[in-house]
Image (cartoon, coloured by chain):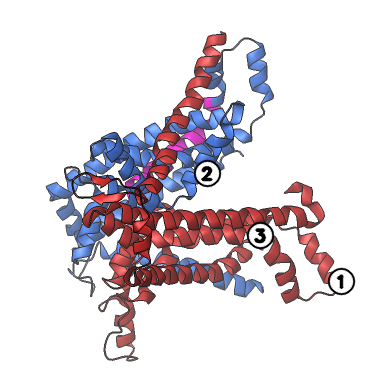
Amino acid sequence: MKSSVGQFRFWAIGLASVWLTLFVFFPNLLVILTSFLTRDPQATVSLPINAASYVRTLDLLYLTVLWDSLRMSLLAMVFCLVIGYPFAMAIVSLPKRWQPVILFLVILPFWTNSLVRTYAIQFILGNQGIINKSLIGLGLIDKPLQLLYTQFAVILGLCYILLPFMVLPLYSALEKLDVRLHHAAKDLGAGPLSRFWHITVPLTSPGIVAGCLMVLLPAMGMFYISDLLGGAKNLLLGNVIKTQFLHTRDWPFGSAFSVILIVLLGFMLWLYFRAARFVSKQGGLNGSDF
Amino acid sequence: MAPIFRWGFMGLVLTLIYIPILVLVVNSFNASKYGIKWGGFTFKWYEKFWNNDGLMGAALNSLTVSIVAASVATIIGTLAAVALHRYQFKGKALLSSMVFVSMLTPEIVMAISLLIVFMALGIKLGFVSLVIGHITFCLPFVIVAVYSRLKGFDMKMLEAARDLGASESSIFWKIILPLALPAVAAGWLLSFTLSLDDVIVSAFVTGPGYEILPLKVYSMVRVGVSPEVNAISTILLVVSLVLVVISQLLLREDK
């Protein structure tokens, strides 16, 4: 009997451990390693180990792309936050029965094909799309507006695809908020705006950071959104990485860009844990419940 | 916020979320080729898709990859969730942090890291590499779904079973699995949809000989309008929507 306990336990722990080590842990190490190798036309990569790929990311051309990509992704993140925060607040203020329904409606699209939904946006923004057709039909404009293949279109597409990722962590942070803190502050004479800034925002900061992380990082990689909505000029970091890996076949260079993303992920996780620690210390009346 | 404003805002955001989907679905039945005007109701784009051997082949490949990937991910993920919930072992913190990291890693980073590891291990790009890649990004979702269901259980029952002499595997088959089944099924359905819809990881780890539907759609929409895409898109959307609704109902049931 002892051996059967051991055997089940062995497989239950072992399978996932081996899988994740082999296909998550080990590959991530390899990306970092590859970024320090040298490109080789025959063997893809070879020695010597050096930091040349990182130096090349500082090239003005790539810095511009990097900055453009970061700016579009950051703007998408900010817009998601600006829409997602009041949205999550509105959900929390609903009766308990309705909350999961609305939440479900927001998250549902996440599970559907995001490429297809990006294509739908392309369809709507095009010169012959609904927006331009209606504006012309209403006589507001004579010529179609150039909506597609602009930075605006890319940012819109990113927001559209990634909004659920912002709403979900914000909702769970807001839901945990102790209403008694608000009542206490109100009794002490704090206005609604002051209560929002001094109670709601600080205590939901882990949710804010988590939401930003879950929008910003994927946003930088979604090459098909910039491909379909941004045209050849408005590139995301994902496009650069994809080109380096699948076309130019400069793996060390592509890996160096990915390491930038990994570093960004690490930084935001650090920020998240700091915020979470702050909240668990300052969590207010029922701090132990967190 | 005043209730009217609150509902108005939520209504507006939800409408904006669903309009593009609706436009796409309606246009898949539009007889006019460029979808500029309503040219009458038609099924012809669906027929074109049905009769296009290349597209149907890609669809079949996609189904195969998704079914295999979802099934393997569900088996490994369920076992892992049980292990994380039930056992204390060396490296438990490492295992759960790997689950956490794999959920947060941007897909593009996962895609290239898998491509590099396939090259390093000499795994040929094609069916096998696609399946491995898809299992990898589905796995954390299954683990989280099953784990959160297990957390709601009364563990005393399992201790009682063990005291009465039940072996660990019969505790799993006779008690844990039946109780966790809704979450296991939901995990499978979610994995299947994730796999069926994936573009980023697939774009990197597929080989030239193995075409799957989302990548076919990607190359079609890049070159321009082809109305079959609307039909394929609608099918993909409807399949995901139905499966996700079922999976959420399974997860909700008797909390």
Q: Chain of mark 1?
A: A
Residue type at mark 2 is Phe
Query: Dot 1: what SS?
Result: loop
Magenta stretch: give its range: B177-199
Q: Position of residue B93 (x, y in %)?
A: 58, 35
Mark linked to residue A188: 1
**Residue ID at (66%, 59%):** A174
Q: Is residue B194 magenta?
A: yes
Mark 2, Cα crowd under 10 Å, few <14 / some 14-19 / many 20+, is: few
Please name the color used to draw chain B: blue
Magenta part mainly helix, strand or loop? helix
Residue B62 left/right relative to B49: right
Q: Please tell me whether residue B242 is drawn above or below residue A142 in the rendered image.
A: above
Q: Position of residue B111 (x, y in %)?
A: 35, 48
* Nearest the eye: A142 or A137: A142
Q: Please tell me whether residue B48 is drawn above or below residue B64 in the rendered image.
A: below
Please name the color used to draw chain A: red
Query: Dot 2: what SS?
Result: helix
Q: CA distance from mark 3 to mark 2?
A: 22 Å
Q: Earlier in the sequence, mark 1 or mark 3?
A: 3
* Nearest the eye: A236 or B60: A236
Q: CA distance from mark 1 to mark 3?
A: 22 Å
Q: Are marks 1 and 3 in contact (CB under 8 Å)?
A: no
Quadrant of the snapshot with the N terminus of chain A: top right
Residue type at mark 3 is Leu
**Residue ID at (50%, 55%):** A265
Query: Dot 3: what SS?
Result: helix
* Nearest the eye: B140 or A237: A237
Are the residues under marks 2 and 1 on the same chain?
no
Residue picked out by circle 3: A174
